[in-house]
C-alpha cells in the first residue's frame, strides 16, 4: 500500500506538468481525490491493514492527500495568474488615443482674475462692497474732492444721463457710500464696471472694470498702504517681482502715488513694452484726503485711511499676454476656451 | 510738456547728469519724465557736402546725376530733387548712413550708380512730414565734410514731462527747474528780470478797465514803442521749436517764450487796433462775434470773458487773441498783456468753443496772480535783449485785492503719523524751504504758486516725495480685526457661476449700453429706458433693460466664427428707470443662451439644475405663448413665490433671423433677485433608507392637451407618505394611441422609513392615484 501511495504521489507530480487549463485541473482533482479517485480507492483498502501498519499508512495517506491538495491550490493560483496575464495582454489598448471629454464651461478670464484678487484681499480681512453704476454726480465727483470746474474732471470723459447723473467713471464712488453707511474700521474692495467715453480700440473701451480698495481706521499710515499693496502685488505677480511707489496726483488722496512693477518683458532694463522706462504702471493709490473723510462724516483728526484703484482689464491682459482689449467683450469661444 | 534740458540748465546746473538719472530722479520726486530724446541720436554718417556738378540722367527725365564733394572724396548721387544748383551746400547721407527714415545704402537708380542721398529737413527729422519741398540748402560759408549733427548743433536733450493737473506751476521752465533743484539738492538760480525803461508814460499809450474782477483778478500791461518786427534769433527760435511751438516773429515769439519759461500766458496787441487806446475786460454780450487768430469766427455769450477796446472785442481772454489786433509786419507800438483769469471760466469757454490752446490749458488749472508782473518784466527784458523795441516807462496793474498767502499748521509729528515713519524736523524744514515754503514755528506759509497745498496732508506729500516714497517702510495693517468676506448675495453670484460652469457653460461679458434697435430685433415694444445724453454712437446709446439681446449677439458672433456649439451665460446687470435719487434701479439677471447639441429640455435641465443648486426643487410652471422673443410652442415660465422668475424656451424663428443665428437657439432668463430671495440654505441630512423600495410602473393615455405637470400634481396631491418619488420615462404620440392623445409612463417608487412595505399597502395608494387620474384628467390606464 505504501508503494501504491508513493506511486500516486509520483504520478501526481508528472500529471501536474501537463495541466494547462482549469478544466484539466478539475479532472486531475477528480482523478486523484474524487469519490472514485485513486487516493480514495487506496484508502478504501485501509481496512485490510494490520493495526500496526494502519497509523503509518494512514499518516502517509494524509501526507499524500495534503500534498495533492496543496499542489492543486498552487496550480490553480498559477493558472489563474496565467489567465489574468493573458487577459491583461489581450486587453491592451492604445493609450495615446485622446480621452473622452465631458463638456466643461469656464468663467470669463476677467472673473477668474477678479476672483483671485478678491481672495487675496478677503484673506487680509476685506469685505466686498458694491455701489450703483448709474451714479449721482455727487458721489462720482464732489464727494471725491472734485468740485465743479475741477480740472481733474476733464481727464475722465464722462457719460452723462442727466446733468446730475452719470455713468460712474471710477469705482471710487463706492468710497463715500461705504463711509457714509459704515463706521471704521473699514476694509473693503469694490470691484465693478466703470465707463469713460473712449472710442473702442485695442487698448480703450468705453466700459471696463476697476477694483477700488478702501481702508479707514485709527492710525492707518502710508507705510501700511505700501505694505498692503506689496502683499497684494507679490501674491498676484510673484515674489520675485520688483515694485516702486512713485508720487502722483489724485484729487481724493493725499499723498498720492502710483505703483509700478519692473517690466516683465525686459526685467527693468528698458524696452518697447515699457517705453524704455523699465517700469509698468500697475495701480494708483494714496492716503484718503482728509476732505473726503470729512465730507463722508468721518473725523479726520481721529481716523485716517488709504485707498487704491486697480484697472482689471489691464491686469488680466498682462497676466495672459492679451494684446487686444476688444476680445474681452466679443465673447468668441475660441478666446474664452483658452483660460 | 516738452522742453530742451539746456533751458533747465539756465536755472539749475544739471551738467554731468545722464538723461536716465535725470528721468529717474524727477519721476520719483513727483514730476514724471516720460522720456528724454537725444537729438541726432538717429542720425549717423551724414556730412555737409558741396554739389560740384549736376547732369541729366541718361534714362530718366525726373532724375539728375550729381557729383558731390563730401570732404575726403567726391561721390556720385542720383536724386529727384529740383531745388538745388551747382555750388550749393547740402547735407549728404553717405553709404551706410542712418537717418530717422532708415538706412542709406549704395545702389543703382535706373542704371546709374548712386552712393548716398542728399537730405531734406524732413529726412533729417527736423521738420514735420510733408512740410518740405526739396533739399535742405545750407549757407554758402558751410565747411565741407563736417558731421551734420555738429554743424546744425543737434546736441539737445529734449525731455517730455507729464504734469499732473494740480501742478500748473510746473507747466514752465522755472517750475521744473525748481523741482529739479530740490530733487537733486542743487541751488536754484533764479534772477529777477530787469526792465530798461526808455521814458514816456505807459498811461499815454493805454488805459485798462476791468469790469469783472472775479473773472479777471489781475491785469498787467506795458507798452513797447519803436518796435522792429522781424525774426527772432536762432537760439530763441530753436528753443521754441524744440518745445513744440512754431516761431513767428520776435514779439509773438517773446510772448510764447515767456509762457514756456514762466508758465504765464501772455498776449501782444498792435496798439493801432485798440480803439481809443483803451482796454476793457468784460463779459461778452450774448451773440457777440469775434474772429480769433486762427481765422475762425466765434459766437460768444455772456459767460465768456473778452478783452475789448472802446468798441469791440479784440481777444478771447486767456484763450486766443483776436485777428483784428494781431501783430503785423509793420506794427510799431505793442501792448503786452500779462493777466490772470478765473480757471473755471476759461475752462468753460474753451470747452464750449472747442479751442484748447497752450494758454487756456494753463489758465484753466488756476494760475498764480503774483506771477503776472514778473512774466511781463521778463518779456520786456527780452525785448531789450533782442533789440526789438523800447519799453515805455511805467506799468499798468489793475488788481483786485490779492489774497494773502495761505498759512497752514506745521506739525512734524502729524506728518510722520500720516506717513508711518519718523523723519526729523530739520529735514522737513529744509525740504519745505527749498520748495519756497516759509516755515514759521508751527506754521507754514505756502508760496502763492502752490495753490494745490491746502493742509497737512499736502505738506506730508511734499516731505514724502523728497524723502523718497521708496524709503518709507512697508508695514501690514494693525488694529481691530475686521470681518472680511462675501455676503449672501455675493456668494449666490459665485454659486450661479460655479453651477453653470460645471454644466458646461461659458461665462460671457457684454456691454451695459446697447442700441435702442435691439427692441425691434427682439420684436418687443420699446420700454421706458435710460438714455445716455452724450453716447459714443447710436449703437451704445441706451442702458439695457434686458441682457437677452447681448446674449443673442454673442451667439451670432460664435456662429459667424464657425463654432459648432455655444453654451453661454452672463450674470448681467440691467438698468431701469425709477430708482432713488433720480438714479436707476439696477437689477441682475442670469441669461443662458445656447445653440448646438441642445433642445428645449436641454436648456430646461440646465435651469432646473441651477434652481436645485439654490435649493429650489419645486416651482409652478406654465407654457408661455405670448412672449414675442420666444417660440410660442416651446417656451415656459417658471414661477417662484407666485412671481414669474424664469422664462425658458426656444428663440422665436423671426428673432433668430433678426440676429442672424441659423441653428436653433435656446434662451433662459432668470431673475437673480427672486432666485436669491427663494434660495434655501437650510439643508438637513436625511436618514439613509433602511428598508427596500417597491417600484410600480404606470402607463396611461391622456389628451395631448394635458401637460405632464398636471399628472405630477395628482401624484403630489395624494399626499401619501410612502410615495417616495416618481420619474417620467416615456411620452409617446402616434397611431396606436390615437389622434389627439398621448401615452405617458411613470415609474413610482414607494418606501417606508420604518418597515418593509407590503403589496397591499402600495396597492391602496396606487388605486387612489389611478382613480384620481381618471377622474381629474380623464386618463385611461394602459396595461
Image (cartoon, helix red, strand yellow):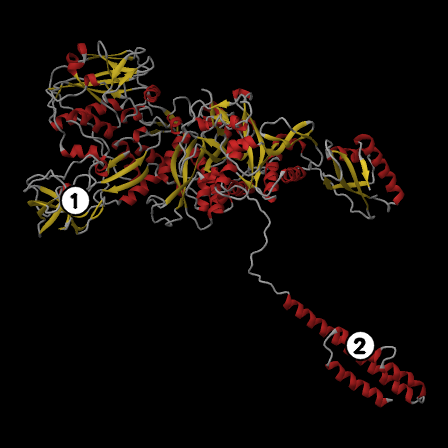
Label 2 packing within 10 angstroms: few (<14), some (14-19), many (20+): few
Label 1 packing within 10 angstroms: few (<14), some (14-19), many (20+): some
Q: Is residue B611 placed above or below B263 in the rendered structure? A: below
In screen coordinates, is B263 left or right of B61?
A: right
- Marker disc for residue A27: 2
Q: Quadrant of the N terminus of chain A?
A: bottom right
Residue A291 coordinates in the image, percent (x, y) = 45, 26
The residue tagged with tag 1: helix, strand or loop? helix
Q: Is residue B743 visible?
A: yes
Asked whether the beta carbons under mark 1 and mark 2 sit within 8 Å of each other, the answer is no
Mark 1 to mark 2 CA distance (whole Å): 109 Å
In screen coordinates, is B534 left or right of A61?
A: left
Residue B262 coordinates in the image, percent (x, y) = 24, 28
Residue at 72%, 71% in the rendered image: A80
- Marker disc for residue B689: none
Q: Which residue is mark 1?
A: B149
Residue A143 coordinates in the image, percent (x, y) = 47, 25
B81 or B755, nearer to the observer: B81
Q: Is residue A301 visible?
A: no
Q: Is residue B609 placed above or below B454 in the rendered structure? A: below
The residue tagged with tag 2: helix, strand or loop? helix
Amino acid at each position: 500500500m505504501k508503494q501504491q501511495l508513493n506511486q500516486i504521489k509520483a504520478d501526481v507530480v508528472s500529471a501536474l506538468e501537463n495541466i494547462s487549463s482549469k478544466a484539466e485541473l478539475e479532472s486531475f482533482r477528480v482523478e486523484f481525490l474524487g469519490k472514485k479517485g485513486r487516493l480514495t480507492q487506496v484508502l478504501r483498502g485501509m481496512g485490510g491493514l494490520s493495526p500496526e501498519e494502519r497509523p503509518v499508512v494512514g499518516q502517509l495517506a494524509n501526507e499524500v492527500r495534503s500534498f495533492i491538495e496543496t499542489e492543486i491550490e498552487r496550480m490553480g493560483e498559477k493558472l489563474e495568474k496565467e489567465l489574468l496575464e493573458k487577459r491583461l495582454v489581450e486587453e491592451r489598448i492604445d493609450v495615446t488615443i485622446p480621452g473622452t471629454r465631458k463638456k466643461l464651461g469656464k468663467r470669463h478670464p476677467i472673473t477668474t482674475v477678479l476672483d483671485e484678487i478678491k481672495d487675496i484681499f478677503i484673506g487680509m480681512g476685506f469685505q466686498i462692497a458694491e455701489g450703483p453704476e448709474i451714479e449721482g454726480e455727487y458721489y462720482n465727483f464732489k464727494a471725491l474732492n472734485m468740485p465743479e470746474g475741477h480740472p481733474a474732471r476733464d481727464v475722465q470723459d464722462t457719460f452723462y444721463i442727466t446733468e446730475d447723473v452719470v455713468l460712474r467713471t471710477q469705482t471710487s464712488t463706492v468710497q463715500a457710500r461705504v463711509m457714509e453707511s459704515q463706521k471704521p474700521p473699514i476694509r473693503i474692495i469694490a470691484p465693478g464696471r466703470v465707463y469713460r467715453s473712449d472710442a473702442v480700440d485695442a487698448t480703450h473701451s468705453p466700459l471696463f472694470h476697476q477694483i477700488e480698495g478702501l481702508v479707514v481706521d485709527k492710525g492707518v499710515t502710508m507705510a501700511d498702504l505700501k505694505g498692503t499693496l506689496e502683499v497684494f502685488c507679490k501674491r498676484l505677480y510673484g515674489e520675485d517681482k520688483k515694485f516702486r511707489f512713485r508720487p502722483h496726483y489724485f484729487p481724493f488722496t493725499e499723498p498720492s502715488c502710483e505703483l509700478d512693477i519692473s517690466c516683465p518683458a525686459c526685467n527693468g532694463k528698458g524696452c518697447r513694452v515699457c517705453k524704455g522706462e523699465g517700469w509698468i504702471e500697475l495701480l494708483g493709490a494714496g492716503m484718503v484726503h482728509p476732505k473726503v473723510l470729512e465730507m463722508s462724516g468721518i473725523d479726520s483728526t481721529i481716523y485716517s485711511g488709504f485707498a487704491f484703484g486697480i484697472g482689471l482689464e489691464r491686469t488680466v491682459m498682462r497676466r495672459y499676454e492679451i494684446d487686444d482689449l476688444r476680445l474681452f467683450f466679443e465673447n468668441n469661444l475660441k478666446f474664452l476656451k483658452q483660460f | 510738456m516738452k522742453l530742451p534740458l539746456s533751458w533747465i540748465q539756465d536755472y539749475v546746473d544739471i551738467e554731468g547728469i545722464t538723461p536716465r538719472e535725470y528721468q529717474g530722479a524727477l519721476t520719483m520726486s513727483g514730476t514724471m519724465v516720460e522720456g528724454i530724446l537725444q537729438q541726432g541720436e538717429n542720425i549717423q554718417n551724414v556730412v555737409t557736402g558741396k554739389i560740384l556738378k549736376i547732369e541729366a540722367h541718361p534714362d530718366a527725365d525726373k532724375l539728375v546725376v550729381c557729383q558731390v564733394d563730401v570732404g575726403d572724396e567726391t561721390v556720385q548721387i542720383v536724386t529727384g530733387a529740383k531745388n538745388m544748383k551747382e555750388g550749393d551746400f547740402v547735407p549728404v547721407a553717405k553709404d551706410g548712413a542712418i537717418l530717422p527714415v532708415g538706412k542709406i545704402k549704395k545702389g543703382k537708380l535706373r542704371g546709374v550708380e548712386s552712393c548716398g542721398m542728399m537730405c531734406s529737413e524732413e529726412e533729417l527729422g527736423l521738420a514735420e512730414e510733408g512740410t518740405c519741398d526739396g533739399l535742405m540748402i545750407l549757407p554758402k560759408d558751410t565747411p565741407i565734410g563736417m558731421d551734420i549733427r555738429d554743424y546744425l548743433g543737434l546736441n539737445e536733450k529734449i525731455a517730455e514731462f507729464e504734469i499732473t493737473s494740480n501742478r500748473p506751476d510746473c507747466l514752465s521752465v522755472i517750475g521744473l527747474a525748481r523741482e529739479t533743484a530740490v530733487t537733486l539738492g542743487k541751488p536754484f538760480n533764479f534772477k529777477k528780470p530787469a526792465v530798461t525803461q526808455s521814458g514816456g508814460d505807459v498811461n499815454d499809450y493805454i488805459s485798462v478797465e476791468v469790469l469783472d474782477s472775479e473773472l479777471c483778478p489781475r491785469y498787467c500791461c506795458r507798452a513797447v514803442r519803436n518796435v522792429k518786427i522781424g525774426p527772432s534769433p536762432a537760439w530763441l527760435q530753436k528753443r521754441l521749436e524744440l518745445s513744440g511751438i512754431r516761431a513767428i516773429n520776435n514779439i509773438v515769439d517773446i510772448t510764447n517764450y515767456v509762457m514756456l519759461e514762466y508758465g504765464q500766458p501772455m498776449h501782444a496787441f498792435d496798439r493801432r487796433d485798440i480803439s481809443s487806446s483803451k482796454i476793457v475786460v468784460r463779459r461778452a454780450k450774448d451773440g457777440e462775434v469775434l474772429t480769433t487768430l486762427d481765422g475762425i469766427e466765434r459766437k460768444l455769450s455772456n459767460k465768456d470773458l473778452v478783452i475789448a477796446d472802446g468798441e469791440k472785442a479784440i481777444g478771447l481772454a486767456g484763450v486766443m487773441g483776436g485777428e483784428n489786433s494781431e501783430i503785423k509786419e509793420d506794427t510799431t507800438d505793442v501792448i503786452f498783456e500779462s493777466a490772470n483769469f478765473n480757471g473755471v471760466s476759461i475752462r468753460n469757454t474753451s470747452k464750449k468753443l472747442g479751442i484748447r490752446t497752450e494758454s487756456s490749458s494753463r489758465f484753466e488749472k488756476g494760475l498764480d496772480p503774483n506771477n503776472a508782473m514778473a512774466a511781463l518784466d521778463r518779456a520786456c527784458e527780452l525785448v531789450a535783449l533782442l533789440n526789438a523795441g523800447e519799453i515805455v516807462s511805467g506799468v499798468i496793474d489793475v488788481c483786485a485785492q490779492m489774497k494773502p498767502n495761505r498759512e497752514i499748521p506745521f506739525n512734524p509729528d502729524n506728518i510722520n503719523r500720516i506717513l508711518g515713519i519718523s523723519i526729523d524736523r530739520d529735514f522737513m524744514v529744509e525740504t519745505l524751504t527749498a520748495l519756497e515754503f516759509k516755515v514759521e514755528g508751527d506754521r507754514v506759509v505756502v508760496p502763492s504758486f502752490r495753490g494745490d497745498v491746502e493742509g497737512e496732508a499736502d505738506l506730508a506729500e511734499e516731505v514724502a516725495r523728497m524723502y523718497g516714497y521708496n524709503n518709507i517702510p512697508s508695514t501690514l495693517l494693525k488694529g481691530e480685526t475686521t470681518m472680511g468676506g462675501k455676503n449672501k448675495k455675493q456668494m449666490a453670484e459665485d454659486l450661479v457661476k460655479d453651477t453653470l460652469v460645471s454644466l458646461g457653460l461659458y461665462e460671457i461679458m457684454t456691454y451695459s449700453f446697447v442700441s435702442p434697435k435691439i427692441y425691434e430685433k427682439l420684436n418687443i415694444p420699446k420700454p421706458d429706458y435710460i438714455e445716455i445724453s452724450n453716447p459714443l454712437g447710436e449703437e451704445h446709446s441706451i442702458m439695457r433693460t434686458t441682457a437677452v439681446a447681448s446674449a443673442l449677439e454673442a451667439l451670432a458672433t460664435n456662429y459667424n466664427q464657425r463654432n459648432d456649439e455655444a453654451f453661454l451665460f452672463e450674470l448681467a446687470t440691467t438698468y431701469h428707470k425709477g430708482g432713488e435719487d433720480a438714479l436707476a434701479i439696477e437689477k441682475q439677471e442670469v441669461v443662458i443662451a445656447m445653440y448646438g447639441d441642445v433642445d428645449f429640455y436641454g436648456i430646461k435641465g440646465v435651469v432646473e439644475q441651477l434652481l436645485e443648486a439654490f435649493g429650489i426643487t419645486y416651482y409652478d410652471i406654465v407654457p408661455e405663448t405670448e412672449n414675442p422673443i420666444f417660440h410660442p410652442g416651446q417656451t415656459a415660465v417658471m414661477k417662484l413665490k407666485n412671481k414669474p422668475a424664469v422664462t425658458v424656451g426656444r428663440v422665436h424663428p423671426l428673432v433668430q433671423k433678426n440676429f442672424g443665428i441659423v441653428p436653433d437657439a435656446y434662451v433662459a432668463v432668470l431673475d437673480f433677485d427672486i432666485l436669491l430671495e427663494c434660495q434655501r440654505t437650510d439643508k438637513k441630512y436625511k436618514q439613509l433608507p433602511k428598508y427596500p423600495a417597491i417600484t410600480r410602473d404606470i402607463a396611461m393615455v391622456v389628451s395631448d392637451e394635458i401637460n405632464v405637470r398636471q399628472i405630477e400634481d395628482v401624484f403630489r396631491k395624494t399626499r401619501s407618505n410612502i410615495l417616495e418619488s416618481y420619474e417620467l420615462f416615456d411620452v409617446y404620440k402616434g397611431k396606436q394611441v390615437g389622434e389627439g392623445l398621448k401615452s405617458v409612463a411613470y415609474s413610482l417608487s414607494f418606501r417606508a422609513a420604518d418597515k418593509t412595505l407590503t403589496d397591499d399597502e402600495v396597492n391602496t395608494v396606487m388605486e387612489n392615484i389611478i382613480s384620481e387620474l381618471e377622474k381629474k384628467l380623464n386618463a385611461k390606464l394602459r396595461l
